[in-house]
Amino acid sequence: MDDDLSRVAQLDPVRDQEPTPEQWARSRARIEEMMARSRTGTAPVRLHRPPARRLVIGLVAAAVLGVGGILAAPALRPGADTAYASWTAIPAEVTAAQLVTLTTGCARSWAEPAGEAVLAERRGTSLFLVLKMSSGALVTCFSWDGDEPAGADRLSDGHGAEPSLPATGRVSMLGGPQTIGGAAGRQTSALGRVGPGVTGVDIALPHGPTVRATVSNGWWAAWWPDRHGDQTDGFRIVVHTAAGSRSYRPEEFS
């Protein structure tokens, strides 16, 4: 076993590099997140990572930890700092070229031909996509720098069935708000479905701007920086309809 690990370590391109305090903080945060998911049974159904990136991260032997059979490495996310600096509370339109790049990378991560884009948004340099694959599976992909996405997560069940639409004028939230990352690169995201008659969705942060969610094809999604961990507790989801607006706490969707 030791000989095998030694041979693997020789392949590590950063074997002589000590992880920075920020990388250790991100690793600990990611481990805590996975432990919490394992306790609550809310782990993603399926997760794919681009093969090249998976190899590099998997070989950072000095920083790999085992937790309940799960291997975790620091969240090495090139472009994260730029994404935070360029983030905007109001999403911008995704260009055709950006959509092609993200869709192609997402399909490559999922190892399946892409179907159609369901929702796409841009906030600064970052891009987020909800994509229906050729099999009918619904997945999400996120890119910090508008280039290769950092893997793909399944939204639909194993048979490709989508979460049901809420009632008229209502929205749903899938799995609650998700916060990942460490002290130097922490983010919170939320997404769900929108029922008929919903004209817009906003996220009212407790200590920051109001974040306008992207609404498209019966879905809504938004993400925001959360460096100090104080933008998750207490935020409200504001649903707009022709009749007016109504505010909800995240726990009302559980």
Image (cartoon, rainbow, N blue to C red):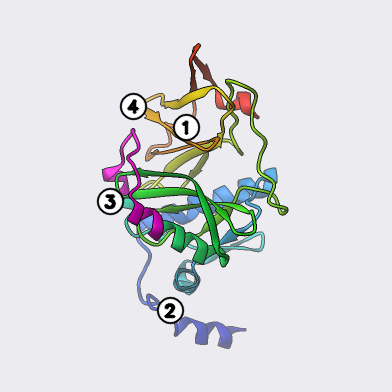
The quadrant in which the C terminus is found is top right
Q: Is residue 65 visible?
A: yes
Category of crowding for the residue at label 1, using alpha-carbon neighbours closer than 10 angstroms: few (below 14), some (14–19), many (at least 20): many
The magenta stretch spans residue 88: yes
Question: What's the mark number on residue 12?
Answer: 2
Range shown magenta: 82-101
Q: Within the image, what quadrant is residue 10 found in? A: bottom left
Tag 1: amino acid: Thr
Q: Give residue 187's quadrant in the image.
A: top left
Instruction: Give the number of the disc on residue 82.
Output: 3
**Relative to residue 70, is residue 51 depicted above or below?**
below
Of all residues, the one furthest to the right in this rendering is 159
Describe the element under mark 3 as helix, strand or loop: helix
Query: Which residue matches tag 1?
Result: 232
Tell me the residue at 60%/38% (across/down). 174
Q: Secondary structure at mark 2?
A: loop
Label 2 close to label 1 by CB (< 8 Å): no
- Alpha carbon separation for disc pair 2 and 1: 36 Å
